[in-house]
Amino acid sequence: MRYGEKEIKEFDVDNMEIWPNDAKNDYIIKITLPEFMCCCPRSGYPDFATIYLEYIPDQFVVELKAIKLYINTFMHRNVSHEASINEIYNTLKDKLKPKWIKVVGDFNPRGNVHTIIECRSDMVVPK
């Protein structure tokens, strides 16, 4: 088993490490994860993307190794572009309870189709 593979396969999102945010100011944390991979649920072929995470923390920030391990768990899963980005968004929103959060998945083109999925906490669509 390669370095980190066991950590990734055994990663438990419920125990994702978060830290207290001691800053008095509001600020934006921007994290880029350029090596995202998941497997297409239909074909099983790998899909690659760059994930852009931005958030304004309230009481907590995510530990960087924890977010890396969490993101890397997707490489062993069959999940669509839309489902993966929505899951990442919901997991981080629920875990960190930030003042604002945005998750963007910029997927590499496959079959001449380029997909970008974006979830934001300030996006309100009337019903």
Image: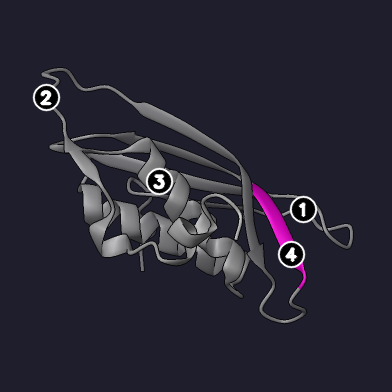
Left or right: residue 116 compared with residue 26:
right
Q: Position of residue 52 (x, y in %)?
A: 52, 39
Mark in front: 2 vs 1: 2
* Farthest right residue in view: 112
Residue placed at 33% from the left, 26% from the top? 28
Q: Of the residues under marks 4 and 3, which one precedes in the sequence?
A: 4
Residue matched to label 3: 67
| Numbered disc 3: secondary structure | helix
Residue matched to label 2: 22
Residue matched to label 4: 46
Residue 46 falls inside the magenta stretch: yes
Q: Amino acid at mark 4?
A: Pro
Q: Amino acid at mark 2?
A: Asp
Q: Of the residues under marks 3 and 2, which one precedes in the sequence?
A: 2
Alpha-carbon span between mark 3 and mark 2: 19 Å
| Numbered disc 4: secondary structure | strand
Alpha-carbon span between mark 4 and mark 3: 20 Å
Asked where in the image residue 111 lies, by quadrant, the reply is bottom right
Alpha-carbon span between mark 4 and mark 2: 39 Å
Q: Position of residue 106 (x, y in %)?
A: 65, 47
> What is the magenta range?
45-49
Residue placed at 36% from the left, 28% from the top? 29
Residue matched to label 1: 114
Q: Callout 1 environment at 10 Å: few (<14), some (14 to 19), or many (20+)? A: few
Alpha-carbon span between mark 4 and mark 1: 14 Å
Q: Is residue 92 above or below residue 65?
A: below
Residue contact at pointers 3 and 2, CB within 8 angstroms: no
Q: Of the residues under marks 4 and 1, which one precedes in the sequence?
A: 4
Along the line of sight, the residue nearer the viewer: 29 or 8: 8
Left or right: residue 94 compared with residue 105:
left
The quadrant the C terminus occupies is bottom left
Left or right: residue 114 compared with residue 75:
right
